[in-house]
Image (tube, coloured by chain):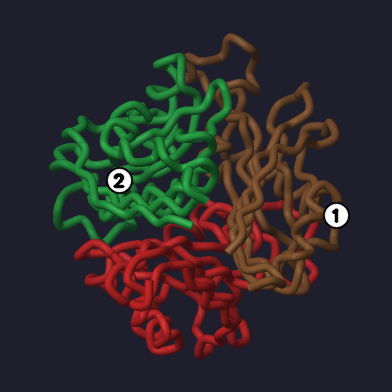
Chain colours: A green, B brown, C red
């Protein structure tokens, strides 16, 4: 049984939904030794989130952005926590709807995803810095 | 420390919210050897999702279907990703709101759920095939 | 590799979003021996939920309550599961949107959270009892 844990920092992203499967894998090459287990991605921020969704058509990502902007409207007059702008409280809400953490099975050295699945970074702020993620992998390696 | 990992395939479901606790347990009998640990259910699709909710009254499941159809409307005119029908993009959105993965504690050989909790498969497509799930259990077995 | 698993009971909370990071840590002192790993918090109920969000400004928590009451309206006429009141079905829905379970990385004996992150108990019922949570920690302790 092996535990790999490290903090990674993603490249800066614009507001919206971004496919980051390759970027994540490039930052955690150690995963290729894990035969079976699970990986956690945990984002250390409350105004961006992580999800699994369709990995092929860019309009899925733009439709996601449009949808969440509609359902969490920046012009709602009832928000009090708006010191950092209209995208402040709405980003916190999107973060709790979509989630701060992903658990992904690991099989034969890589993420065990369906054919059409990819990892998304959902950037909810208009201007955000680089986002940090703690990756923890628990699994059996080749020596087990 | 033991890791069990296998892929299972559920029986085909109609659109809606379905209680699948027994079906899952019947497909992972190996869990009965795990004294304490956690199990992950990870669905390999982006148009169906998994959640934990009330396990007794069928109107909870039908109300869930009604609610999510209301909040993610198929007649929204702003969706671009609609090639496979009006239930295409909406299914992807529901999948990210509800989630692709469940983590459940395992205690004394079975899921450690509250009295009123059950596992739901949320089928968002009008016509879907059989859904595949990767189950990973990490825990101590009797030999520990 | 060590697995800690125990059930804890939180102090009773009023309806709304509550910061519980300290309360959780006080109930799981054993975590201070875990050098690296992950912890799961799993709530044994279907009308309250758990999330990670901003840990400083109380208006984030009150805005969350206002938002989820708006998006999951108690006066919707289409709900059938309302035997226990208008906050019955809406609590189940909020529970599936926000989630019943949290996974949090553990590093050097405590939760590895971002500077502004805290653990929330989201109490969706008007009158709820004390909520029970199963905590499972998987990790390496000092003896590894």
Residue C73, numbered circle: none
Query: What distance separates the C-alpha of mark 1 from that of mark 2?
Result: 36 Å
Seen at 54% across and 22% down, the residue is A116
Crowd rating for badge 1 (residues with CA inside 10 Å; few <14, some 14–19, many 20+): few
Question: Relative to the observer, which residue lies in front, A72 or C73?
Answer: A72
Q: Chain of mark 2?
A: A
Q: Which residue is label 1 attached to?
A: B22
Q: Does residue B85 sit above or below C113 in this rendering? A: above
Secondary structure of the residue carrying numbered label 2: strand
Residue C134 drawn at (x, y percent): 58, 76
Res C90 visible: yes
Q: Does residue C91 sit above or below A142 in this rendering? A: below
Which of discs 1 and 2 lies nearer the camera? The answer is 1
In the figure, is residue C56 to the left or right of A66? left
Q: Which residue is label 2 attached to?
A: A48
Crowd rating for badge 2 (residues with CA inside 10 Å; few <14, some 14–19, many 20+): many
Residue B17 drawn at (x, y percent): 76, 44
Res C46 visible: no
Residue C55 drawn at (x, y percent): 27, 70
Question: Relative to the observer, which residue lies in front, C50 or B29?
Answer: B29
Seen at 78% across and 51% down, the residue is B28
Q: Does residue C136 sit above or below A12 in this rendering? A: below
Q: Which residue is farthest top?
A: B83
Where the C terminus of chain C falls, by quadrant? bottom left
Answer yes or no: are tags 1 and 2 on the same subunit. Answer: no
Q: Does residue A75 sit above or below A136 in this rendering? A: above
In the figure, is residue B45 to the left or right of B64? left
């Amino acid at each position: 049984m092996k535990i790999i844990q490290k903090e990674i920092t993603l490249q800066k992203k614009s507001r919206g939904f971004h496919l980051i499967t390759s970027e994540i894998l490039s930052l955690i090459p150690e995963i290729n030794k894990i035969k079976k287990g699970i990986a956690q991605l945990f984002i250390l921020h409350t105004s961006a989130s992580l999800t699994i969704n369709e990995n092929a058509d860019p309009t899925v990502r733009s439709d996601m952005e449009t949808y969440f902007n509609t359902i969490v409207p920046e012009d709602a007059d009832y928000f009090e926590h708006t010191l950092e702008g209209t995208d402040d409280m709405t980003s916190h809400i999107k973060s709790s709807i979509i989630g701060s953490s992903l658990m992904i099975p690991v099989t034969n050295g890589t993420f065990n995803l369906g054919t059409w699945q990819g990892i998304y970074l959902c950037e909810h702020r208009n201007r955000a810095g680089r986002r940090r993620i703690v990756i923890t992998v628990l699994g059996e390696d080749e020596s087990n």
